[in-house]
Amino acid sequence: MKLLFLNGPNLNMLGIREPDIYGRRTYADLEAYIGDFCGQMGIEYAIKQSNYEGGLVDAIQSAYGSMDGIVINPAAYTHTSVAVLDALKAVALPAVEVHLSRVSEREDFRQISYAGMACVKTFAGYGFAGYRMAAEFLMEYAKN
Ligand code: DQA
């Protein structure tokens, strides 16, 4: 099982940005957390982060033929990007959407998720654990 973990804009600022919402752990902490559970679960993985819409599109396209699934937190591009949605549809890999915060309880403009329309599942509001839940979901999904 090979998974791409893809994070969008400003997630590299974890630990600094709005700690009341996103916590005090850093992006390096998130990378270590993902590495730990992938090791435990026997998952091969790549972790990428981009502050650019096109960087996310490139990363999704590069997963085609090399990855079995995508765990994506498109961050702000969740709510705006038809390009990210189209890229997920283009590669047609099983994808799970993750958000650290409980977006359903936040501003109106966060209530639409374009990327989510191409995802088989969403985990929002579980902090770092959402990434692990997404990986577990994709492992089960691959069996069926
Ligand atoms: C986020 C939620 C988005 O609305 C926001 O723009 C982010 C982070 C989350 O992980 O909770 O940057 O995706």
Image (tube, grey):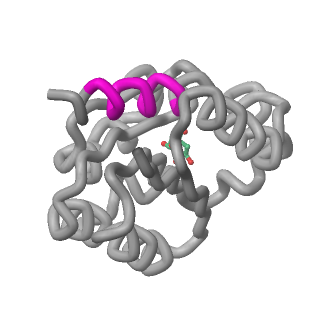
Dividing the picture into quarters, in which one does residue 20 lie?
top right
Q: Is residue 94 above or below residue 111?
A: below
For the C terminus, the image quarter is top left
For the N terminus, the image quarter is top left
Please give the name of the residue rendered at 31% of the width and 36% of the height, measured from the top-left corner.
111
Q: Main secondary structure of the magenta part?
A: helix
Q: Is residue 48 above or below residue 123?
A: below
Camera-side residue of 106 and 70: 70
Q: Is residue 133 magenta?
A: yes
Q: Total marks drawn?
A: 0
Question: Percent from the top left, x then y, of residue 15?
Answer: 83, 40
Please give the name of the residue rendered at 33% of the width and 75% of the height, measured from the top-left corner.
61
Please give the name of the residue rendered at 30% of the width and 46% of the height, measured from the top-left corner.
95
Question: Percent from the top left, x then y, of residue 3?
Answer: 45, 50
123 sits to left or right of 41:
left
Q: Is residue 66 magenta?
A: no
Question: Percent from the top left, x then y, of residue 104?
Answer: 38, 24
Question: Percent from the top left, x then y, of residue 14?
Answer: 76, 45
Outermost residue to the front: 42
Please give the name of the residue rendered at 61% of the width and 63% of the height, measured from the top-left corner.
49
Camera-side residue of 63 and 54: 63
User: What residue range appears in magenta?
Assistant: 131-140
Camera-side residue of 67 and 87: 67
